Amino acid sequence: MGLRGIVLLLSLILPVATLAQSPVQTSSQDTIVTIGKIYITGNRKTKIEIVQRELDLVEGQQLTKQELAAIILLDKQKLINTRLFVFADIVPLMMSDTEADILVNLQERWYIFPAPIFKIADRNFTEWLVNQNADFSRVNYGLQLYHFNLTGRNDRLAAIAQFGFTNRYQLQYQIPYINKKQTLGFLLSTGFNNNKTVSYNTENHRLRFVQADNFIRRSFFVSSSLTHRPSFYSRHSINVAYSRASVADTIRTLNPDYLATGDNLQRYFRISYIYSWDKRDYFAYPLSGKIYRLELSKYGLGVFNDLNMLIARGSYGQFFDLGKNLYLANSISAQYNFSDDIPYFNRSGFGYRPDFIRGYERNVVEGKYFVLNRSSFKWKFFSGVRELYRNSRIEQFRTMPYAFYLKAFVDLGYVGDPISSVQGEFFNNRLLASAGIGLDIQTYYDFVVRFEFSVNREGQSGFFINFRSAL
């Protein structure tokens, strides 16, 4: 029997009275506890240093029992937020009133996902169903391969070959740590897209498309990022990218402002700086904590003179656990483009990821700047773990956790001056607002589905389905 087996056996045969002296249950919260050995089990693929990087607990550390309970909770959340583990538990093994060993028990996710692609090409399900009349020619299909823990260092490889509405080929590799201190990470990504159908302009806040027998838009990009993570919750990133886009005469004729050059070709370099401070409990569907994010991007570095834009962006979100399965969430984001000449190809605003206002799923509102606030009040009325295949050889798929939330929400937004080529601008420079109720279903592997009924300020109502968290 190896060390891990001994530790697991020990955790089972320790007297129940001893385990009952865990920091959460003890009546002597101010007692100083010295951390002894830290045992990590269940990390079959993941390197032990990747797990240790997420732990505030260290051997020899002295803490009160109250401090130990708080650190254990935060360390569990950090381990789950690596997206490497389905389950993470940290158990204090009380060897005496003042000494405790720590058992970190993990269950890894299934890391390899070779999966077919079959998804709509439009901005959201409602855009496809209502605005495009559920047109199946607007569907993408193909094959994607993801490995979310390639060498056991939380490094991720993605390869995509997609056909249909958009022909897309992409390769990406990301490794979170490339130095011994585990503070520096690196990402490299490249790909190109070809389209026979293209949204060439916006009219009355609806996208207008043109279709051809041959490819009428081609784009290529390559980007790399260097990240610095000095602490558990803060991260700095520098991203440098090159982009090249070309369009057929058809698009240039329909919208002379489609590219910044007014021609068929646009090329530019971009450099971005991003800072984030993220202390949410669980990234995929946060219920408590907060996040800040600041971004500054310069498009066009004087090499080609095809594009010259400076964009500043900031966001803040806070999540409150009110107790009794009640939760409150609020997020605010803002963006400002300092350029007065914004090509349609580089447009932004409501309706484009990650910026949307519920109740306006059928619309896009492009502009020079915007401010957005989303709020939700939720009640978790049903949750648990369902057994799927008890005898499955793949332990990651033996059970499925789930949670159901009823919610009410209110969204507010404002988009400033529109870009020059857009026609029909009645949503710009005015307050947009919506309210509604809905149901969120959340389960493992970061899967979230939202069913929502909303009414916006214009009196338009509808039922919408989305497949990612709203905030």
Image (cartoon, rainbow, N blue to C red):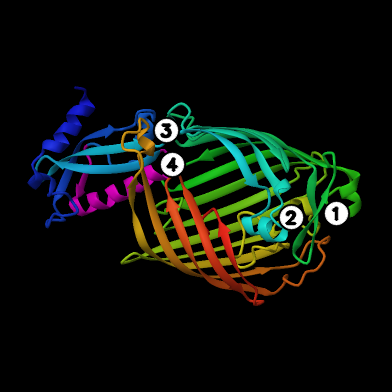
Quadrant of the drawing holding the N terminus: top left
Q: CA distance from mark 4 to mark 1?
A: 42 Å
Q: Depth-wise, is mark 3 or mark 2 nearer the camera?
A: 2
Q: Earlier in the sequence, mark 2 or mark 4?
A: 4
Q: CA distance from mark 3 to mark 2?
A: 40 Å
Report the disc number at residue 83: 4
Q: Is residue 363 left or right of residue 174?
A: right
Q: CA distance from mark 2 to mark 1?
A: 11 Å
Q: Earlier in the sequence, mark 2 or mark 1?
A: 1
Amino acid beneath label 3: Lys
Label 1 sits on residue:
257
Q: Identify the image quadrant of residue 303.
A: top right
- In the rendering, at what x and y percent does residue 108 appear? 37, 35
Report the disc number at residue 181: 3
- Kindly check if marks 3 and 2 are in contact, taking CB atoms under 8 A apart as contact: no
Look at the image and say whether residue 274 sits in the magenta stretch. no
354 or 269: nearer the viewer:
354
Q: Depth-wise, is mark 3 or mark 4 nearer the camera?
A: 4
Q: CA distance from mark 3 to mark 4?
A: 21 Å
Q: Earlier in the sequence, mark 1 or mark 3?
A: 3
Tell me where the magenta segment starts and ends, as one range.
Answer: 60-84
Instruction: Using the rendered image of the protein, determine whether residue 56 is visible from the camera's viewpoint.
Output: no
